[in-house]
Image: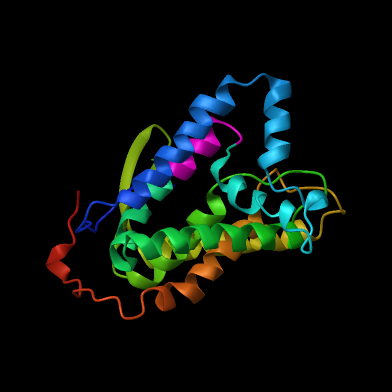
């Protein structure tokens, strides 16, 4: 299944969400793609989150908790993350407000990175990508917009099929699949990763979103959504 868009209009321009997308694009398009293979490897190991190089008692090793969420491992990784952020992030920013949304997003990425590092990270393999922070956005969307619909492309042989899936179903299925894969990954031998995917970053980010979305929206005034505010395309 591939999400095309959701059915909620954002009431304000999502300046923070677009800024995050642009920053990720700058790092990927103008830095990562222009490095040699050796240079890219050094860059990833320097700014990615490597468990063996991280120490809770040494603040000088903490910066990858932020920098790792702006790195990506290829076109598919980059485009899928940015597309998901584009679809779901604007409405969450609308609900939280731009300033709170920025803090919420970055803190979600930090929490997701820590959980991945302690539960699913091989000691010398860097974790990179915005997916942990984006999972936090999905957790907030799950809480705030349960009646939204996600217009989803489902390939059926050679026929394109577009179907409206309730957000709670789409995101709930996504989370269950991540949890299932993450639990299976725990059974792998030490130092072995499950397909190079940070399952526990996704799980941790989503749970963070479920827990922290409402506190971040505390005393934030918002007008209720009505059924006629949802639109099909």
Q: For this view, does 92 lie left or right of residue 180?
A: left
Judged from this view, the residue extending furthest toward the left is: 228
Residue at point 56%, 62% (across, down)? 205
Location of residue 46 in the rendering, given as x and y in whole percent from the top left corner:
71, 39
Above/below status of 181 relative to 129: below
Membership of 31 in magenta stretch: no
Report whether residue 226 is seen. yes
Q: Position of residue 133 (x, y in %)?
A: 52, 56
Q: In this view, does 2 lie to the left or right of 197?
A: left
> In screen coordinates, is 123 left or right of 86?
right
Q: Tell me what residue is drawn at x 54 percent, y 50 percent.
A: 131
Name the residue located 59 percent from the left edge and 51 percent from the top edge. Answer: 66
Please state if 119 lies on the left or on the right of 159 as rendered. Answer: right
Observer-nearest residue: 114 or 98?
98
Rendering quarter of residue 118:
bottom right
The region drawn magenta spans: 73-83
Residue 37, percent from left and from top: 70, 21
Magenta: main secondary structure equals helix
Q: Residue at x 46, y 32 (%)?
A: 26
The outermost residue toward the right is 189
Between residue 38 and residue 142, name the one nearer to us.
38
Query: Is residue 77 shown above or below 63?
Result: above
């Amino acid at each position: 299944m591939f999400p095309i868009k959701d059915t909620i209009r954002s009431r304000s321009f999502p300046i923070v969400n677009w800024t995050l997308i642009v920053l990720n694009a700058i790092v990927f398009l103008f830095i990562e793609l222009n490095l040699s293979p050796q240079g890219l490897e050094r860059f990833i190991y320097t700014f990615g989150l490597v468990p063996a190089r991280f120490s809770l008692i040494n603040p000088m090793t903490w910066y990858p908790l932020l920098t790792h969420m702006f790195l990506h491992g290829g076109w598919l990784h980059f485009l899928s993350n940015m597309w998901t952020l584009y679809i779901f992030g604007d409405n969450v920013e609308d609900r939280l407000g731009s300033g709170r949304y920025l803090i919420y997003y970055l803190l979600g990425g930090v929490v997701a990175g820590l959980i991945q590092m302690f539960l699913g990270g091989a000691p010398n393999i860097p974790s990179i990508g915005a997916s942990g922070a984006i999972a936090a956005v999905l957790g907030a969307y799950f809480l705030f917009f349960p009646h939204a619909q996600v217009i989803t492309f489902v390939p059926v042989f050679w026929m394109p099929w577009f179907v409206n899936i309730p957000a709670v179903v789409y995101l709930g299925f996504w989370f269950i699949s991540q949890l299932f894969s993450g639990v299976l990954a725990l059974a792998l031998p030490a130092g072995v990763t499950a397909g190079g995917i940070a399952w526990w970053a996704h799980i941790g980010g989503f749970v963070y979103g479920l827990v922290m979305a409402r506190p971040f929206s505390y005393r934030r005034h918002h007008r209720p959504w009505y059924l006629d505010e949802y639109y099909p395309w």
